[in-house]
């Protein structure tokens, strides 16, 4: 606040007119991007010495047409998640990803059972990462027939080669048990013990408890992970968990809260949605405004001077940094009077006197400063101020001479 004795005297005589001007000054510039891509960590030596081969196998049985909730069928949800997986696959030497489907011929009637039970096809070979081909085949997938898991595993076994430094893996997504009379558990064990040493991972999608028990031995005998998923979010987490285990993709991301002038909220970050249902303890920021987190949704909460808490929800994506932009709101000097500062939703961030040099970290937005307890002859009665990302907004009061 800048004012002369003459101006202050005038203000005292004319307080009823509420004459003031709020001047906004941007101190720290730089808007930047709301989200910046964080490069996935890669170890060149390890990649050169180890080749990872993955065959994704997707269930196209008729039961995938069932509703999963939220206006989506199981197939629609699976296709959406599979496209997310394809987007995240790295196109680099030493990573090879193929795609096999089953149950895509005939239909799920008894009359067409024999036809459907012989349908299992490698539609994208395990040669590099052909994202265009993978997306095309995912988009073509439709829920049609029966569930020949054993046939698919046996045929998949012939898609891999044996050799030093190879990691051969099947990632099977199924919404049911074997329905074609085969023994997928025995086949998974045979693949694991064979020359190519193929590991079979299983993601059971929307399975009943009985079905979970029936397919669990596929992963157990195949030496792989056995994960369940009840919805699209959980399916995504399960697939990314397996691919991270294989060091194909990064399943972690970062949250960074913007620091301005050394100030950022010491927020508590609480996991909301977990695909693998594993418990995760809340994380509270202390000296660092950046933290690595598993993929998922989080609530970010921090206390304000008023005692009320601000909260936002963020989505952490694999290999990316999710930014929470910030602003500083600098107050004018007061004379002992009490002001309340609220955001546009009415949340109280500050309720105390304004002293020289007071400021708070806020999200970019519109804020109202209002006198609630008058002491002496205050110059500022009320002001509404907009703060910008990465900036300090200084409120200065000028009075007429």
Image: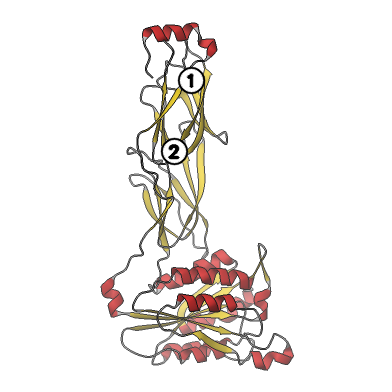
Label 2 CA crowd tier, 10 Å (few <14, some 14–19, many 20+) = many
Tell me: residue 156, above or below residue 267: below
Along the horizontal axis of the image, is 247 left or right of 279?
left
**Residue for point 30% across, 75% down:** 47
What residue is shown with label 2?
Answer: 388
252, 23: nearer the viewer: 23
Percent x, y of residue 257:
40, 46
Label 1 CA crowd tier, 10 Å (few <14, some 14–19, many 20+) = some
Percent x, y of residue 134:
50, 77
**Residue for point 41% across, 50% down:** 33
Question: Which residue extends farthest front?
Answer: 401
Secondary structure at numbered mark 1: strand
266, 280: nearer the viewer: 266
Along the horizontal axis of the image, is 6 left or right of 138?
left
Of the numbered discs 2 and 1, the one sitting upstream in the chain is: 1
Percent x, y of residue 59:
59, 80
Secondary structure at numbered mark 2: loop
**Residue for point 57% across, 75% down:** 139
Query: In which quarter of the view is residue 281 placed?
Result: bottom left
Percent x, y of residue 246:
40, 74
Q: CA distance from mark 2 to mark 1?
A: 25 Å
Which image quarter holds the N terminus?
top left
Are the two marked residues, 2 and 1, in contact with CB atoms closer than 8 angstroms?
Answer: no
Tell me: residue 76, above or below residue 192: above
Specify the label residue 1 is tagged with: none
Specify the label residue 338 is tagged with: 1
């Amino acid at each position: 606040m800048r004012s002369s004795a003459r101006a202050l005297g005038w203000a005292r005589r004319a307080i009823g007119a509420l004459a003031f001007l709020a001047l906004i000054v941007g101190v720290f510039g730089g808007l930047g991007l709301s989200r910046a891509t964080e490069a996935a960590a890669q170890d060149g030596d390890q990649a050169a010495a180890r080749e990872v081969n993955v065959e994704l196998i997707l269930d196209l049985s008729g039961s995938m047409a069932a509703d999963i909730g939220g206006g989506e069928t199981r197939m629609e949800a699976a296709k959406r998640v599979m496209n997310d997986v394809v987007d995240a696959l790295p196109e680099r030497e030493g990573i090879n990803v193929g795609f096999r489907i089953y149950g895509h011929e005939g239909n799920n009637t008894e009359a067409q059972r024999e036809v459907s039970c012989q349908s299992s096809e490698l539609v994208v070979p395990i040669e590099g990462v052909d994202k265009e081909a993978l997306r095309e085949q995912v988009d073509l997938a439709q829920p049609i027939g029966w569930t020949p898991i054993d046939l698919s595993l046996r045929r998949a076994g012939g898609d891999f080669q044996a050799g030093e430094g190879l990691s051969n893996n099947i990632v099977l997504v199924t919404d049911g048990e074997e329905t074609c009379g085969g023994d997928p558990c025995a086949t998974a064990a045979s693949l694991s013990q064979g020359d190519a040493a193929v590991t079979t991972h299983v993601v059971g999608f929307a399975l009943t408890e009985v079905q979970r028990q029936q397919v669990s031995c596929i992963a157990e005998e195949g030496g792989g992970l056995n994960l369940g998923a009840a919805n699209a979010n959980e399916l995504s987490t399960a697939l990314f968990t397996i691919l991270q285990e294989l060091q194909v993709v990064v399943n972690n991301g970062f949250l960074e809260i913007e620091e301005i002038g050394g100030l950022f909220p010491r927020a508590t970050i609480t996991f909301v949605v977990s695909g693998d249902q594993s418990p995760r303890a809340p994380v509270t920021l202390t000296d660092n405004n950046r933290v690595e987190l598993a993929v998922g949704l989080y609530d970010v909460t921090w206390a304000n001077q008023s005692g009320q808490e601000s909260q936002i929800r963020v989505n952490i994506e694999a290999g990316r940094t999710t930014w929470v932009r910030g602003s500083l709101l600098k107050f004018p000097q007061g004379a002992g009077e009490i002001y309340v500062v609220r955001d546009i939703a009415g949340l109280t961030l500050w309720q105390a006197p304004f002293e020289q040099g007071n400021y708070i970290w806020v999200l970019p937005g519109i804020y109202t400063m209002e006198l609630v307890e008058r002491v002496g002859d205050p110059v500022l009665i009320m002001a509404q101020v907009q703060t910008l990302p990465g900036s300090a907004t200084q409120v200065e009061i000028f009075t007429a001479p």
